[in-house]
Image (spheres, rainbow, N blue to C red):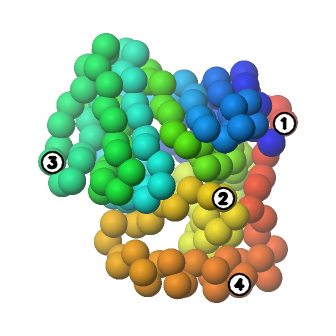
C-alpha cells in the first residue's frame, strides 16, 4: 500500500516519485506526489483521458511540455497545468535541459497512488519492457481494480470499457496482480 514519504525510482525512465498524500490519508479525495524527471524527448505516457479525475501539475523547477486537447504547450517553474476530467491530454514531461520537478496530483485520488506504485514497482523488479511499460494484460488488471477511469485516446472509450473486464480476467488467469509494491529499493 502506498504511504506518505515512500520514494520510488523507475530505472528505465529515470523518473522518481515521492508520495506526499495517498488515498488512505484523505479518504481518497486526493493523491499527490513529487515527481522528478530527467530531460527526455518523448512523454512517458501516451495521449489519454481520465473520465472521473482532475489531474494537476504544479511546476516546481525546470520546464514541462504537455498537450491538452491536441495543443502543445510549455510550463515553467511557478506555473500550474490543470487537466479537467474528460480532457484528452499528454502528461507533462521534461522539455528542458535541467531536471523537471513538479507536484503531480489527482482529485479525487481513485487509486492513482496504487497505479503509480504498481507501475514503478514492476519496473524496479524488471517486469516491464525497456521503456518501463507494462504489458496490456497487466495494465488491464490494474485499471480494472482501481476507481480511476483512464483510457487511451486512440481507441473508442466504449470499446475499452467493454474489453477491460475481460482482459483483466485473462490477465489474472496469467497471474498478474492489481497491486504490486517494493518495500525498499536496492
Disc on the earlier residue, 1 or 4: 4
Residue displayed at 64% across by 68% down: 144
Residue at which label 3 appears? 71
Which residue is farthest right? Answer: 183
Secondary structure under tag 2 reads loop
Q: Kindly indicate whether the residue at mark 4 contacts the one at mark 1 (C-beta within 8 angstroms).
A: no
- Which numbered tag is attached to residue 170? 4
Which residue is depicted at the point 50% across and 34% down? 105
User: Callout 3: 10 Å neighbours few (<14), some, many (20+)?
Assistant: few
Alpha carbon separation for disc pair 1 and 3: 39 Å
Looking at marks 1 and 2 on the same chain, the residue that comes earlier in the sequence is marked by: 2
Q: Nearer the viewer, mark 4 or mark 2?
A: 2
For residue 146, the mark is 2
Q: CA distance from mark 2 to mark 3?
A: 29 Å
- Residue 78, image x and y in percent? 31, 14
> Which residue does the numbered mark 1 point to in the structure image?
183
Amino acid at each position: 500500500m502506498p504511504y506518505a514519504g515512500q520514494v520510488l525510482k523507475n530505472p528505465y525512465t529515470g523518473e522518481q516519485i515521492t508520495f506526499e498524500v495517498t488515498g488512505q490519508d484523505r479518504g481518497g479525495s486526493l493523491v499527490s506526489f513529487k515527481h522528478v524527471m530527467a530531460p527526455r524527448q518523448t512523454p512517458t505516457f501516451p495521449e489519454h483521458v481520465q473520465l472521473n479525475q482532475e489531474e494537476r501539475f504544479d511546476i516546481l523547477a525546470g520546464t514541462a511540455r504537455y498537450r491538452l486537447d491536441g495543443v502543445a504547450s510549455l510550463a515553467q517553474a511557478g506555473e500550474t497545468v490543470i487537466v479537467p476530467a474528460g480532457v484528452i491530454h499528454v502528461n507533462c514531461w521534461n522539455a528542458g535541459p535541467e531536471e523537471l520537478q513538479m507536484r503531480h496530483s489527482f482529485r479525487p485520488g481513485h487509486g492513482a497512488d496504487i497505479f503509480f506504485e504498481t507501475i514503478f514497482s514492476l519496473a524496479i523488479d524488471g517486469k516491464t519492457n525497456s521503456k518501463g511499460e507494462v504489458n496490456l494484460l497487466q495494465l488491464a488488471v490494474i485499471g480494472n481494480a482501481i476507481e480511476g477511469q483512464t483510457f487511451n485516446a486512440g481507441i473508442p472509450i466504449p470499446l475499452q470499457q467493454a474489453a477491460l473486464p475481460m482482459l483483466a480476467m485473462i490477465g489474472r488467469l496469467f497471474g498478474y496482480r492489481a497491486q504490486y509494491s517494493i518495500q525498499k529499493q536496492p
